Amino acid sequence: MKRDLTELLDEWPYEPGQITVRVIEGIDGQPRIQVRLDLGLLQMNTDGRPDGKRPHGFDSLLDYFESKIDQDSIDALHPTDASDAPEHDSGNEGFLEKTPFDEQDQTPSTDARFLTPDDCRALREEAQQYYHRYIAMLVLEDFEAVVRDTSRNMRVLNVFRDHAITDEDVHAMESHRPYIMMMRARALASQALKSEENKAAILAVDEGLCALKKYYEMIGQPELFEESGEAAMLRDMRDTLIPKLPVSQKAELRQRLDAAIAAENFELAAILRDEIRMLGGRPHK
């Protein structure tokens, strides 16, 4: 068997400073994503776990642990004996509690913290695979796949937050949340732009900014929102989109502003005021 990759690498040169991606057909006839690296190639499946493995018979390690969480939740709700019912542990409140910015979080919560450091390491390595794939998919402009994989990695963060034994593992993963939130919002906006839905694209960016602001408030560091590189990237994206809106949409933006103020959603109201000003109008309030 010929194992030297020199010929393969020479026909597809590495370009420094660029993410070079292509889709090829695998020997099984299924598509594969390839990313050219400085020292070789990274190849991934387009669906399922990027390396094609099925840990414990599940599509991913995350799915395996989520199935355990679901079963534990069912057992906790319907214990076979009253003495088996778990007591509430108030020590998991505060930073580690569920937060409203997690629109992807559909997993029933239990108080059990069972993910060992080795479990967490394996989940981190798996999440890294999905990270490589959604970056590649972003280059390929497959924004639906980016939304899929970023949403999936948000679920990983939620599992760490609720079930990791050590706070070190929780906080190490939680630091990635702003970036993943930004990438997901960016992909949703880009997906809308691809369909020439500028208004929907701006809405996706606005929702991403609001989610980021709520996140920093939730962790008790609201001042970091203004300094956030993720928030700056979404603002830049919004600034390029606002001038593309027809002037006739000022009235609709004012209606959204009024509704946001009535709902006391002041984060969104501030964003909408900026949009109206950029269109050359004045907000009513």
Image (tube, grey):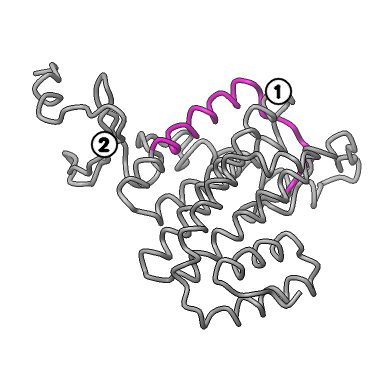
Using residue 229 as the reference point, say whether residue 71 is left or right of it. Answer: right
Check disc 1 and give the amino acid type: Glu
Q: Position of residue 192 (x, y in %)?
A: 43, 65
Q: Is residue 24 left or right of residue 138?
A: left
Q: Residue at x 66, y 78 (%)?
A: 254
Compared across the picture, whether 185 is left or right of 90 comes to left
Asked if residue 22 lies in the magenta stretch, the reply is no
Q: Indicate the quadrant where residue 10 lies.
A: top left
Q: Which residue is mark 1?
A: 168
Q: Which residues are magenta?
A: 109-132
> Circle 2 sits on which residue?
20
Neighbourhood count class around disc 1 (C-alpha, 10 Å): few under 14, some 14–19, many 20 upward: few
Give the mark nearer the N terminus: 1 vs 2: 2
Residue 169: image location, x then y, percent: 67, 25
Helix, strand or loop for disc 2: strand
Q: Is residue 270 above or below residue 94?
A: below
Residue drawn at point x = 69 percent, y = 30 percent: 170
